[in-house]
Amino acid sequence: MQTETIWNDIYAKGPQTSSGKPGLALTQFAGPLRAGTALELGCARGDDAVWLAGRGWQITAVDVSSVALDIAARNAEAAGVAHLIWLAVHDLALSFPDGQFDLVTASFLHSPQDWPRGEVLAKGAAAVAPGGHLLIIEHASRAPWSWSPENTRFPTAEQTLASMQLDSKDWAHRCLCPIARSASGPGGQSATVTDNILFLQRLS
Ligand SMILES: C[S@@+](CC[C@H](N)C(=O)[O-])C[C@H]1O[C@@H](n2cnc3c(N)ncnc32)[C@H](O)[C@@H]1O
């Protein structure tokens, strides 16, 4: 099945409204930054983009799912920040938005099918303007309700960084670490999960 179809089915069956809550790690790492231009990869229903826009960021937010982007558009309208968010459909394995940005974020940009994730994240890094930041938040453990197989092996933050093949002289590592958080599942379940944080600043 095509990536777009997989994710459109997921969003068509899920809630048609947004949670209205940004990711915790996004708020912790992007919160202190001065607002500028941002690119969000895999924006889903737009909760992170709406939160960034509420803090003055101008965001290009992309996802492979047009169903998710329709929800994100309504979410942005309802929050009064639609004028700060440009939504676009991209299968990031096939096409990538143009431009350079003060912040590039990718939160839980995972997908069940095989795809060149390291290459896509490297394109995200290439889209960071000098002095800007790259924030990648990814699963480092499996939540009990996850669609990923039980034997899934998650990379460390260092392994994800290595997969991007960045030139180390161009980047300062502000945070490269796992963090634990309490997570809630779709049925109201809760569990402690681990995420990797890759928070880098582009030097040149
Ligand atoms: C696990 S969800 C995470 C969504 C959101 N960023 C969050 O933090 O909750 C992964 C998102 O990435 C998107 N995605 C998966 N593969 C993609 C691809 N090849 N190109 C663009 N978006 C993709 C999915 O549609 C989905 O919205």
Image (tube, helix red, strand yellow):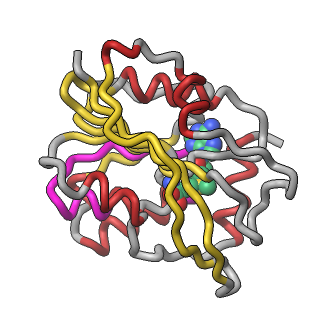
Task: Identify which residue, 91 or 202, lies in the foreground.
Answer: 202
Task: Identify which residue, 71 or 161, lies in the foreground.
Answer: 161
The quadrant of the image that shows the C terminus is top left
Vertical placement of residue 196 versus 202, above or below: below
Task: Identify which residue, 191 or 42, lies in the foreground.
Answer: 191
Give yes or no for residue 51 being in the magenta stretch.
yes
Task: Identify which residue, 102 or 89, lies in the foreground.
Answer: 102
The quadrant of the image that shows the N terminus is top right
Is 80 left or right of 117, judged from the image as shown? left
* Rendering coords of residue 35 (x, y %): 15, 48
* Rendering coords of residue 86 (x, y %): 32, 46
At a point 64% along the width and 82% down the height, the residue shown is 190
At a point 19% along the width and 50% down the height, the residue shown is 57
Vertical placement of residue 137 versus 181, above or below: above
Q: How many circles with numbers are drawn on the protein? A: 0
* Rendering coords of residue 17 (x, y %): 50, 76
At a point 37% along the width and 42% down the height, the residue shown is 175
Magenta region: which residues?
Answer: 50-68
Vertical placement of residue 147 versus 14, above or below: above
Residue 131 image-quadrant placement: top left
Is 71 left or right of 13, judged from the image as shown? left
Is 70 left or right of 130, judged from the image as shown? right
At a point 39% along the width and 16% down the height, the residue shown is 168
* Rendering coords of residue 66 (x, y %): 56, 51
Q: Is residue 164 visible?
A: yes
Q: Is residue 65 visible?
A: no
